[in-house]
Image (cartoon, rainbow, N blue to C red):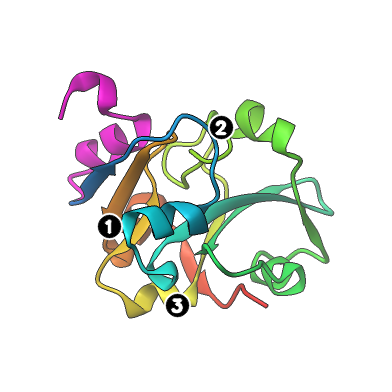
Amino acid sequence: MAKDTKTNAMRILEQKGIPFDVNLYECEEFIDGVHIADQLGQPYEQSFKTLVAVGKSGGHYVFVLPIAQELDLKKAARTVGEKAVELIHVKEIFPLTGYIRGGCTPIGMKKQFPTVIDETASLFDEIIISGGRIGAQILIDPQELQKAIGCKFEELTI
């Protein structure tokens, strides 16, 4: 893979010896995950989006769930021990994580926030997450992703 196509997330996985595949596709600007999956012929239930939330305590949390599903904020709050969480505003994504909307991945954010992945990920040998920039995907075994970022699997969707 060319050096300029590698992202921080990919470098971190390589450094940790975590196996993964990369899928690069043409895309100039943010398009939601459902449209990307449609373009690439990928199953919705195996394709995951990364959302960042803030809790009542002020702590930040990362939630990874299937692209066609909605985050249940009450379930999400329970999984991280908060009374309530709310999604951060789009303009906060880059300063907080180092990633832009559409390229946000749970691997290699500026700070490793507590991360919860929807339990359905464990049904698959491989899930698809953002590769750390628009136009890049990481295909990874969810158990290997757990090793890389120390996440847990819980029910997150409505």
Q: Earlier in the sequence, mark 2 or mark 1?
A: 2
**Cα gap from disc 2 to disc 3, whole angstroms:** 25 Å
**Cα gap from disc 3 to disc 1, whole angstroms:** 14 Å
Q: Position of residue 17 (x, y in %)?
A: 17, 45
> 99 or 45, which lies in front?
45
> Which residue bears the numbered disc 1?
140
Camera-nearest label, 2 or 1 = 2
- From the viewer's perspective, is residue 49 above or below residue 95? below
Q: Is residue 31 magenta?
A: no
Q: Is residue 152 left or right of residue 11?
A: right
Disc 2 crowd, CA 10 A, few/some/many (<14, 14-19, 20+): some
Q: Residue furthest top?
A: 4
Tell me the element at label 1.
Answer: strand
The magenta segment:
1-18
Magenta span dominant secondary structure = helix
Q: Which mark is residue 120?
A: 3
